[in-house]
Image: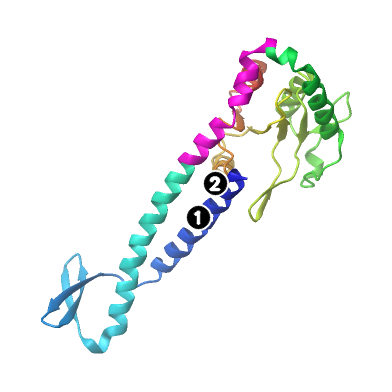
């Protein structure tokens, strides 16, 4: 519940920041200075080369500069709140893994909890086998067949899926994920086999391509904005043409997250 509220607040502030930045772009140059002269105020527009007096018949110009100064302070306040929320999201996500850490460090207790674990295993098996909304983009790129009937877009994804199956870690391939107004299709949506918690695995296979790299780093930013923090519940691997993904890398990542 708290996580959802946090995501909504992050999204609200993100949209507010974007609106203010767009408004500031359209506002006149200069910074308003107000100086009191007895009972009245005099207005000046300050520029790098000095300042100019704003007469009373140009009050609308002074009002615009006043709004500009206020919006700049508000923008700074909102950006500070964004930093706080990101930090809070990271801490909350870390604390949410305490039961997972406990089970990983206490296999003997896991054994004593085998009844509840059996129920979880049944639930995860049903989750993995239930139909779900998948990506329909570029079906012609799905060309790497498997003996269990799935088809993948790359050899690297096939390697990852194979290792997940061998480890009996339930997953869904390219399952729809709603993040605000956008729908993503993570390479793998994964459930922890002992806790049931959800993880997302994205493999970035063309990191030597500047356009691909920029697009996908924006994708990572979108995840983080919605509380799916890289290194916490977002698993990532990378490769280039000269440095392909290795089984060792996959195994190390899966061990790190799932023991």
Residue under the image location 42 percent in, 62 percent down: 21
| The stretch drawn in magenta includes residue 105 | yes
Estimate the x, y position of residue 110 in percent, counting from the top left: 71, 15
**Of pointers 1 and 2, the one earlier in the residue sequence:** 1
Quadrant location of residue 237?
Answer: top right
Left or right, 95 with respect to 37, comes to right
- Of 240 and 25, the residue lying toward us: 25
Left or right, 141 with respect to 79, comes to right
Mark 1 and mark 2 residues within 8 Å of each other at the beta carbon: yes
Q: Which mark is residue 127?
A: none
Is residue 244 in view from this perspective? no
Estimate the x, y position of residue 193 in percent, counting from the top left: 74, 24
For the image shown, how many numbered marks are present on the structure? 2
Q: Give the magenta part as a residue range.
A: 87-108
Quadrant location of residue 132?
Answer: top right
Q: Which mark is residue 225?
A: 2
């Amino acid at each position: 519940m708290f996580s959802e509220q946090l995501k909504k607040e992050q999204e609200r502030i993100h949209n507010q920041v974007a609106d203010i930045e767009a408004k500031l772009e359209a506002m006149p140059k200069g910074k308003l200075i107000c100086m009191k002269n007895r009972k009245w105020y005099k207005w000046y527009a300050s520029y790098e080369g000095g300042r100019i007096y704003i007469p009373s018949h140009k009050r609308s110009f002074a009002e615009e500069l006043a709004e500009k100064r206020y919006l700049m302070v508000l923008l700074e306040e909102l950006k500070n709140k964004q930093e706080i929320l990101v930090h809070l999201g990271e801490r909350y996500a870390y604390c949410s893994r305490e039961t997972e850490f406990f089970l990983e460090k206490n296999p003997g207790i896991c054994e004593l909890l085998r009844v509840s674990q059996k129920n979880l295993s049944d639930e995860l098996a049903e989750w993995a086998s239930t139909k779900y909304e998948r990506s329909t983009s570029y079906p012609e790129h799905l060309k790497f067949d498997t003996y269990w009937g799935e088809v993948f877009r790359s050899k690297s994804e096939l390697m990852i899926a194979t290792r997940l199956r061998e480890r009996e870690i339930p997953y869904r391939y390219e399952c729809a994920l709603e993040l605000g107004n956008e729908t993503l299709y993570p390479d793998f949506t994964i459930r922890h086999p002992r806790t049931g918690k959800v993880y997302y695995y994205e493999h970035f296979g063309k990191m030597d391509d500047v356009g691909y790299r920029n697009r996908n780093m924006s994708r990572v930013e979108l995840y983080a904005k919605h509380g799916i923090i890289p290194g916490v519940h977002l698993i990532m691997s990378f490769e280039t043409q000269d440095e392909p993904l290795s089984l060792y890398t996959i195994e190390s990542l899966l061990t790190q997250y799932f023991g």
